[in-house]
Image: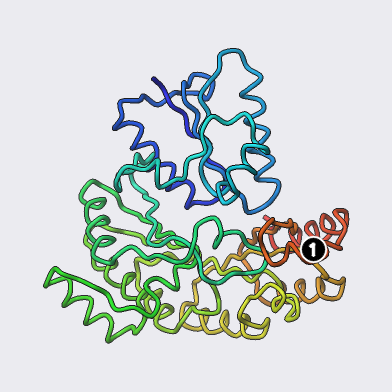
Amino acid sequence: MKYFIKTFGCQMNEADSEQIAAAFQLKGYQKAKTIAGADVVVINSCSVRQSAEDRVLGLINNLRKKVGKQKIILTGCMLRYSSAYLQDKVPGVDEFVKVQELISGKKALRKDKLHAWFPIMQGCDNFCTYCVVPYARGRERSVPIQEVYESICHLVSHGYKEVTLLGQNVNSYHKGKKFQVKEKELKKKVLNLEKKYKNNFAVLLALLHELEGLEKIKFITSNPHDLQDGIIKAMKLPKIDRYLHLAVQSGDDLILKKMNRKYTSAQYLNLLKKIRREIPDIQIGTDIIVGFPGETKQQFENTLSLAKKAKFKIAYISKYSPRLGTVAYKMKDDVSPQEKKKRWQILNKLINKK
């Protein structure tokens, strides 16, 4: 029996798919070279925007048109919907299975032999009004620091040189909680780092930085409202990557408030100044949504103004898409598709010139 995994969406989904692949290998399945050659097709879905769901639906329809029925399993963020809704919306699927039910332990079948994606937490507690993540992945749960440390030690011993720590908001790793560490030497290191950095994610960065053989540490994604001084201090360590992805979403304070982003445009820009003062060679990328409900032309101009001041290296710009179940879904989607496209093009030309 052969399997094929098609992954949509973010790096967290990529990491999940690596674990799903390992589980299939343990069951005796072989990886198919192409989707057409698979007996079982696992579709790891994204639900962040309607366009992502549409791509999933298009793939399923295409698979069902082919001769020779394949078993199709749908997993990932689209499983935030009820079973009845999914069965009606995606009739071509044989099974709807949550990611954690497909994964066996912590094993991952990684494509890269030098770089590893490593989830340190799942879920989100921020409840931005446009976002499905708290509904698709639940509330924040952090992997114990000893487990993260031992797992990455294992990766390094097997030749991995780089690791990217993943979380919907890595800044809140073990936020407000005390680390539980059983191994004595590791506990001593953690306690010393806690005194120095006074932030749990910063402690993790500094702890991994000490690992001999590990050459680079990356992480995504960070929320501006809780990127504390301790994290900036840890980011100055030589092995920490000099790229920071810091989503702003809008440059207008009223839109930020409607999005439930817990900062103002001025606070965001001041944070960038502080980071660049401490780490002069840092490059900063961001996410921006255009056409959020009620966004006027002037409010979009405010976003343009912020983008010019921020001097982003790159921006992932998306046109607002109503998501069932979110607070913003109840707001009137009153910016036309044509206007959203126009604003997207203007921002993209400004930031992503290269």
Residue drawn at x 29%, y 65% as measured from the top left: 144
**209, above or below 232, in the image:** above
SS at mark 1? loop
The N terminus - image quarter: top left
How many numbered marks are there? Answer: 1
Name the image quarter holding residue 177: bottom left
**271, above or below 295, in the image:** below
The residue positioned farthest toward the front in the image shown:
84
Q: Position of residue 281 (x, y in %)?
A: 49, 72
The residue positioned farthest toward the top in the image shown:
67
Q: Nearer the viewer, residue 173 or 306?
A: 173
Q: How is the image coloured?
A: rainbow
Q: Position of residue 26 (x, y in %)?
A: 29, 32
Residue drawn at x 67%, y 28% as measured from the top left: 61
Q: Which residue is mark 1?
A: 291
Q: Nearer the viewer, residue 99 or 84?
A: 84
Horizontal placement of 66 versus 299: left or right?
left
Q: Nearer the viewer, residue 273 or 16?
A: 16
**16, above or below 307, in the image:** above
The C terminus - image quarter: bottom right
Horizontal placement of 120 versus 281: left or right?
left
Name the image quarter holding residue 232: bottom left
- For badge 1, the amino acid type reads Gly
Q: Residues within 10 Å of mark 1 (few under 14, many from 20)?
A: many
Q: Position of residue 150 (x, y in %)?
A: 22, 58
Q: Position of residue 218 (x, y in %)?
A: 42, 61
Residue drawn at x 38%, y 36% as measured from the top left: 21
Q: Nearer the viewer, residue 75 or 147?
A: 75
